[in-house]
Image (cartoon, rainbow, N blue to C red):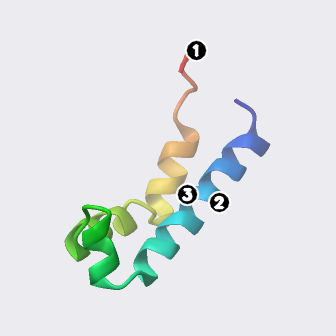
Amino acid sequence: MNIKSRVRRLSSRYQTRQQLRCLPDHLLKDIGKTRQDVTKELNKNTLIGVIARFLQPVRKGA
């Protein structure tokens, strides 16, 4: 996977997480998530985590 596709994928994940953050609790319940689940997901997108995942070697076949 090249750098451009990695950045695109990270950007897409970031946008999805931000949309989750804006959902009210009753809609989260409809999709089987809690506010705690969303908080946990949002914490995955810290700058250090993004850089660490970006620098991991690419596994073939993944």
**From where the camera sits, is residue 20 visible?**
yes
Q: Secondary structure at mark 2?
A: helix
Mark 2 and mark 1: Cα distance apart in space: 22 Å
Q: Secondary structure at mark 1?
A: loop
**Left or right: 20 as drawn, with respect to 3:** left
**Residue holding disc 2:** 11
Specify the farthest residue to the right. 4
Mark before the other along the chain sequence, 2 or 1: 2
Against 62, residue 34 (above or below) is below
**Left or right: 58 as drawn, with respect to 7:** left
Q: Residue at x 54, y 53 (%)?
A: 51
Specify the farthest residue to the top. 61
Depth check, front residue: 38 or 53: 38
The amino acid beneath tag 3 is Arg
Q: Position of residue 15 (x, y in %)?
A: 59, 68
Against 61, residue 48 (above or below) is below
Q: Which mark is residue 31?
A: none
Tell which tag, 1 or 3, sits nearer the viewer. Answer: 3
- Which image quarter: residue 40? bottom left
Q: Residues within 10 Å of mark 2 (few under 14, many from 20)?
A: few
Against 44, residue 28 (above or below) is below
Look at the image and tell me in which quarter the N terminus lies.
Answer: top right
Mark 2 and mark 3: Cα distance apart in space: 5 Å
The amino acid beneath tag 2 is Ser
Q: Residue at x 31, y 72 (%)?
A: 28
Q: Position of residue 55 (x, y in %)?
A: 56, 40
Mark before the other along the chain sequence, 1 or 3: 3
**Residue holding disc 1:** 60
- Which image quarter: residue 11? bottom right
Q: Are marks 2 and 3 in contact (CB under 8 Å)?
A: yes
The amino acid beneath tag 1 is Lys
**Residue holding disc 3:** 13
